[in-house]
Image: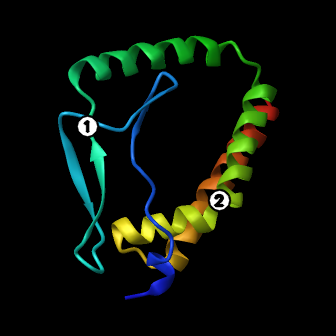
Amino acid sequence: MNPETTAVPYERLGILIDGRWIYEAERSTEVVDPATGQTIARLPFAADGEIAEAVASSQRAFESWKDRSPLERGRILRRFADLARKHADEIARNMTRDQGKPLSEAIGEIRFAADHADWHAEEAGST
């Protein structure tokens, strides 16, 4: 077992719907560390009403997003890329713990996602 992947406690998992975190639910599933077989967290499932709330919230967010300028969208994408890079080690440790993915591959995947967001930000600015 790699101590680097188990040194940091796994955070509490939740579902974010319309700015509200839901940590407890009637149904949930275990998140198992494939290296140890131990349950490291529980992931709640959204109930039907929460799914409807999430869909409605997404529609409202789209209405706001579609009216943003391409330059503003690009700034938001760049901010995402910056945050992903800043927290890459932390995110990668969690990916390794719940997927069994090698840490170096997890970090590479996060960096690729950040680069991809930057690419889209540049495209938004060139329209």
Instruction: Return the disc, 2 or 1, that comes first in the chain's sequence.
Output: 1
Q: Give the residue displayed 23% in from the left and 56% down from the top.
A: 30
Q: Looking at the picture, which amino acid does disc 2 mark?
A: His
Query: Which type of secondary structure does the marked residue at label 2 adopt?
Result: loop
Q: Position of residue 15 (x, y in %)?
A: 39, 36
Front one among 78 and 70: 78
Quarter of the image holding residue 45? top left
Q: Name the side, left or right, on which 112 lies relative to 72.
A: left
Residue 75 image offset from top left, x and y in percent: 78, 35
Label 1, residues with CA under 10 Å away: few <14, some 14-19, many ≥20: some
20 is higher (above) or lower (below) than 106: above
Crowding near the residue tagged with mark 2, few <14, some 14–19, many ≥20 C-alpha atoms within 10 Å = few
Q: Quadrant of residue 126?
A: top right
Q: Is residue 127 above or below residue 120?
A: above
Q: Amino acid at mark 1?
A: Phe
Q: Which residue is mark 2?
A: 87
Picture residue at 39% right of the left edge, 21% below the top: 54
Q: How is the image coloured?
A: rainbow
- Residue located beneath label 1 in the image: 45
The single residue placed furthest to the left in the displayed view is 27
Identify the residue at horizontal 46%, vertical 66% (top origin): 9
Quadrant placement of the C terminus: top right
